[in-house]
Image (cartoon, rainbow, N blue to C red):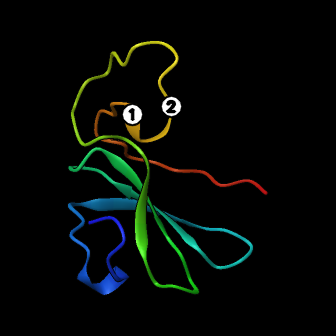
Amino acid sequence: GDGSQGQDSFLSQPVSLEKDENENFFIGDTVNNRIRFLNKISNKISTLIGKGKTNPNSPAGTFGNETNLNKPLGLAYFD
């Protein structure tokens, strides 16, 4: 869960992974319907986007962990 060490986190079918210029990781946690962030320095994981519910119709104006995702399958990181 959020705030736990990376190795102790439960991810479900993480099918996509991107690394930023600081070697932090963005993870598409597909079955959990979330985009996760793993901090290289603290080794802690957090949710960037998604609240864990499958719903392709999130209300307009929702952001971050208030957004519903529907099984994210890909990520792209551009710096």
Residue closest to the eye, 78 or 32: 32
Residue 38 lies, in percent from the top left, at 48, 72
Residue 55, image x, y percentages: 25, 24
Give the quadrant of residue 56: top left
Q: Is residue 78 above or below residue 64?
A: below
Q: Which mark is residue 66?
A: 1
Residue on which disc 2 sits: 63
Q: Residue at x 74, y 73 (%)?
A: 21
Position above or below: 1 against 63: below
Q: CA distance from mark 2 to mark 1?
A: 6 Å
- Circles 2 and 1: CB atoms closer than 8 Å: yes
Residue 25 at x, y percent in the picture? 53, 70
Which secondary structure lies at badge 2? loop
Residue at position x 74%, y 53% in the image: 78
Label 2 crowd bin: few (<14), some (14–19), many (20+), radius 10 Å: few
Q: Is residue 54 above or below residue 79?
A: above
Q: Name the quadrant of the N terminus.
A: bottom left
> How far across and down, in percent of the image, does residue 29 sit?
32, 56
* Screen quadrant of the C terminus: bottom right
Q: Horizontal placement of 19 versus 9: left or right?
A: right
Q: Which labelled disc corresponds to residue 52?
A: none
Q: Is residue 64 above or below residue 27?
A: above
- Kindly give the residue lying farthest to the front in the view shown: 3
Name the residue type under label 1: Glu
- Residue 52 figure quarter: top left
* Residue at x-position 41% and y-position 41%: 65
Identity, as a three-letter code, of the amino acid under mark 2? Phe
